[in-house]
Amino acid sequence: MPNQIAISFVLAFSMLVCLAISPTQINNQQEKTPEKPPLILLYDSLPDPDATVRVQSMNAEPWMNVTQDPESFKTGLVDIDAAIRQVQNKSGGQPPKWMMLDLEDPFMANLRKAPDSPERQKSLASMISAIRAMKMQYPNCKWTFYGIPSISYWVNDRGWATASVEEKKLALERAVATFQSLVAEVDWVSVSIYDVYDPKMVVPGSPKSVRGTPESVREDGRAWRMASTGLAKLMANGKPVIPTICPTWAPTGIAPYCRLIPLKDFVLDQVAPAVKAGANGFAIWTSMDYRIEQVTQAEVNPAYKSTEQNFGVSEWRSALTADYFNGVAPQNWSDPFIRQQLIKKTSRSITDALFAIRSWERTGEAP
């Protein structure tokens, strides 16, 4: 159970975020605070090597996502040897400074079970053993877990902008109890604050619509990101808080999945709320190297025929067609020319997202 000091911090934070800071206060400008160090900017994928010069000019660094082994989806246990092999294969034995263990299913569900639950105990112990082993194997790297701590986007079927103070307190208190042992192990804290609900998709009466109004959808998202980042900041105990963000619409909500988010919305809805709550930087996730392989090789290699809900081959091809090919789908996705176009254009989008953050940080102006 969380100690009383932790609970006091959470309650103090909840009062601050729920009552004193309104997400509607976020606008096209941020308050300039030159005394703060520059934001840490990280990226997981940059398909075009020629784009490296641009990211280096923004002092952006790579980070690596270490995904869970197939057996762990059944066992809730980490195969440490498999994780080490993955790092070796991806990095050639020279991993970047910033590293992340991505353990989601069934780990997150197990962690939320009762403290004495065997499922919680085994997954928690396995995760702690895994990150300690990775630190020992790669002592020059900084390690974290994906999406920890985590709070639900909805509180009793309401958004964070409208849920009651008591409901928010309880949600934050539970998150401390669930994740404090893991936050204690990491070198940096990376809550996941992707955009999953598009305010433009409010269609009254439609079963596929986002509930509320465009304004309330945006406020709920900003309030949730502030709460997520603020909680991470309190639990981090001085460690860097670097939320994971995404320049495309992510699944689990209602949005034009996989499409690029307008840069202005990307900055004001993901970046600005997190900075207001104390974020030290951002880790952009796209997995774009894999996505390009997926859409160009799906007919050739069965391994790329993903069945991810709202995030599979068909959704990515549709989004890439709209964003990069003027709505005209390539006749042959395996054409080397199409692949090269995707490499160049997606890399430009990734560097544009990084530039938008750095420019907003420097000038206070959103794109």
Image (cartoon, rainbow, N blue to C red):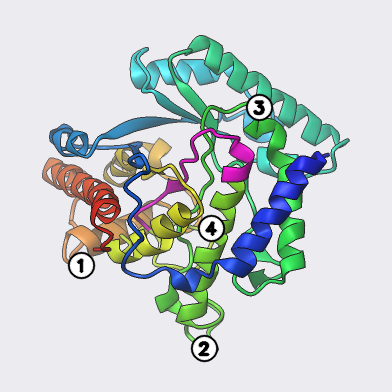
Asked whether, in this view, residue 136 is left or right of residue 280, the answer is right
The residue carrying mark 2 is: 204
Seen in the picture, residue 69 relative to 105 is either above or below; the reply is above
Q: Find the magenta span and give its range.
A: 233-248
First reached walking from the N terminus: tag 4 or tag 3: 3
Q: Residues within 10 Å of mark 3 (few under 14, many from 20)?
A: many
Cα gap from disc 2 to disc 3, whole angstroms: 43 Å
Quadrant of the rendered image containing residue 250: bottom left
Which residue was labeled with disc 1?
Answer: 327
The residue tagged 3 is 127
Q: Is residue 44 magenta?
A: no
Front position among marks 2 and 3: 3
Residue at 59% over, 14% down: 133
- Which label lies toward us, 4 or 1? 4
Residue 21, label in figure: none
| On screen, residue 26 above or below 283 | below
* Distance (Cα) linking label 4 and label 2: 27 Å
Q: Earlier in the sequence, mark 4 or mark 1?
A: 4
